[in-house]
Amino acid sequence: MALTDVVVPQLSESVSEATLLTWKKKPGEAVQADEILIEVETDKVVLEVPAPASGVLAEIVKDDGSLVTSGEILARIDTDGKAAAAPAAAASAPAAAPAAVSAPAPAASAASAGIASPAASKILADKGVSAASVAGTGRDGRITKGDALGASAAPAAAPAAPKVALANPSVPMTQSLDGRPEQRVPMSRLRARVAERLLQSQQDNAILTTFNEVNMQGVIDLRNLYKDKFEKEHGVKLGFMSFFVKAAVAALKRYPILNASVDGKDIIYHGYFDIGIAVGSPRGLVVPILRNADQLTIAEIEKTIADFGKRASEGKLGIEEMTGGTFSISNGGVFGSMLSTPIINPPQAAILGVHATKERAVVEKGQIVIRPINYLAMSYDHRIIDGREAVLGLVAMKEALEDPQRMLLEI
């Protein structure tokens, strides 16, 4: 027997341990080299563990839900083994039991069966019992007074339990003290880490939020004019997020404190623009980073964001892709949010919240007109960012979005 170990992949230096999810194979089953055997969840990403060789899964060392560290042995594969054969089918199926033959029903007149005497009818009516549900013992099956007195109404059917969407189908539904359904599901490591960081952000930062509105007509017109040619040329749809990224970079260049971070009693001004894009995934919120966003074209930004979204839903983002960042953008508008106050992603000092663009009545030159308006919200750490820089920075983003040609030409 030649055994090959299946081990935990190398984790990031900032990640000390991970949690095993669910094994996809059982001992004795055949596996192929590079076939995914299990997934390992850290507080940032989910990593796949492939089979290092073909053979038979000889032993599982660590069960589902175990805490593991880098290089730890999870299972062993017998590279010389063969999968156990399925149990041989029975030589012959047992003979089917003869169908039960019911005794002939008593010869009762169809006209008489289910007919109650006047006294019996009154008793049944008072009880709410149908005559058809009572077996009569009288002549030709008639229902007698005695039959009616002994009859009882069928118990009311218990109300059907309401259908409840299960957060985790593998966890059974239980009942609370008052008998209502509940399901208790442990937080995933990613969800627990997100919760920890959000609490840390609110405890450690002096968060304040400033708001402004932006007329998106210029961006919409530019997008409608070129979106078909853009997709044909670059193989990706022209969305709105790339314009928000470009507008944010333009403002960060004018007000560098918005792109800074806090380290103890020091302020670190970053000479680069790594923009975190908040992405929802089945396992929780993740924030992959657009590195050097100021150097990326609109097409490169759109392609990268589309790739982030796809791999986030598959749990395939790497730890290094979510490490760092100097500023973040959260787009609640894709879910229909009109307004929110985003929470800073530490150690960053500011975050932009983008919302749904809706037609609204606004006043221009003394006239009420309809315009596609998006409300922007920027939360910032008031310890290092004064209201002046925060407000002017958000105004700079507004101006860039309302005149996108100037923004893209950098004039």
Image (spheres, helix red, strand yellow):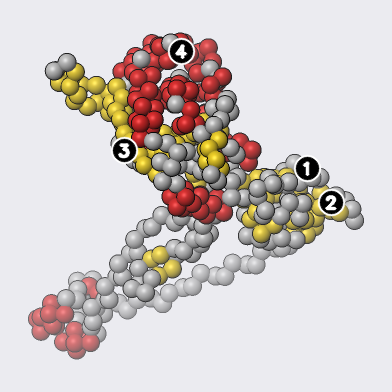
Of callouts 2 and 4, which one flags the residue occurring earlier in the amino acid sequence? 2
Res 98 seen here: yes
Rendering coords of residue 236 (x, y %): 51, 20
Q: Residue tagged by mark 3?
A: 339
Q: Is 33 positioned to the left or the right of 388 in the image?
A: right
Of callouts 3 and 4, which one flags the residue occurring earlier in the amino acid sequence? 3
Task: Name the residue located 86 percent from the left edge and 54 percent from the top edge.
Answer: 3
Q: Residue tagged by mark 4?
A: 410
Rendering coords of residue 182 (x, y %): 40, 65
Q: Which mark is residue 4?
A: 2
Which of discs 3 and 4 lies nearer the camera? The answer is: 4
Of callouts 1 and 3, which one flags the residue occurring earlier in the amino acid sequence? 1
Decide which of 183, 292 is in the foreground and name it: 292
Q: Determine the secondary structure under disc 1.
A: loop
Which of discs 2 and 3 lies nearer the camera? The answer is: 3
Three-letter residue code for mark 1: Ala
In the figure, residue 143 lies in which quadrant? bottom left
Rendering coords of residue 345 (x, y %): 49, 42
Q: Residue tagged by mark 1?
A: 33
Q: Is 98 positioned to the left or the right of 7 in the image?
A: left
Q: Determine the secondary structure under disc 3.
A: loop
Res 84 seen here: no
